[in-house]
Image (cartoon, helix red, strand yellow):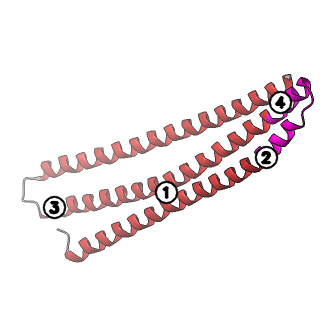
Amino acid sequence: MMTVEQVLASQKANVETLLGLTAKAFEGLEKIVELNMTASKAALAESGDNVKALLSVKDAQELLALQSSLLQPLAEKTAAYSRHLYEIATGTTSEFSKAFEGQAAEAQEKFAGLIDSAAKNAPAGSESAVAVMKSAVAAAGNALESMQKAVKQATDVAEANFAAVTNTATNAAKATSKKR
């Protein structure tokens, strides 16, 4: 049985974790706002330069050359923006995952402690029921660990796919601009 002090300590730890995660969420949001502001300022400045360049074009060949010269940097900047946004999102998500894993491990540990305590105080003849309970807890722990590994693998695959798509888009833009 948990004491009042243990319950209060657990609640305090949960509130601290929640406050920490809230701070991390706001930190991630601030980074995204900062990224968007920087990207917007850069896009606005470049738009002005691009309009000036377009207005100074004298013939179709010069227009095609200008168009080609603008395409590759745009694709590269879009890819860089996407990578940065993805890094912010995965960084924030990993903080939540770490907190969840920590809380899950702590809860599992406490539950195992309760089972051990109950086993010590169990009446004679209930050893098989206690063994079944311990086995179920171990199976649940193994299932949780397997799920965490599967999520990690899926995240790794998603990151690899994102990198491949970004590289393909950048290379395609380079190839297109070289053909013109």
Q: Amino acid at mark 1?
A: Glu
Q: Nearer the viewer, mark 3 or mark 1?
A: 1
Q: Quadrant of the C terminus?
A: top right
Magenta region:
47-70
Q: Amino acid at mark 3?
A: Ala
| 3D distance between C-alphas at marks 2 and 4 | 18 Å
Which labelled disc corresponds to residue 68? 4
Instruction: Residue at 44% x, 62% y: name it.
Output: 21
Residue occupied by mark 1: 95
Q: Amino acid at mark 4?
A: Ser
- Left or right of 157, for residue 14: left
Labels 2 and 4 touching (C-beta < 8 A)? no
Sequence-wise first label, 4 or 3: 4
| 3D distance between C-alphas at marks 4 and 3 | 74 Å
**Which of the 4 image quadrants contains residue 110?**
bottom left
Label 3 packing within 10 angstroms: few (<14), some (14-19), many (20+): few
Instruction: Residue at 23% x, 46% y: name it.
Output: 136
Label 2 packing within 10 angstroms: few (<14), some (14-19), many (20+): few
Label 4 packing within 10 angstroms: few (<14), some (14-19), many (20+): some
Secondary structure under tag 4 reads helix
Q: 152 above or below 71?
A: below
Sequence-wise first label, 2 or 4: 2
Residue occupied by mark 2: 48
| 3D distance between C-alphas at marks 1 and 4 | 42 Å
Residue occupied by mark 3: 118
| 3D distance between C-alphas at marks 2 and 1 | 40 Å
Sequence-wise first label, 3 or 1: 1
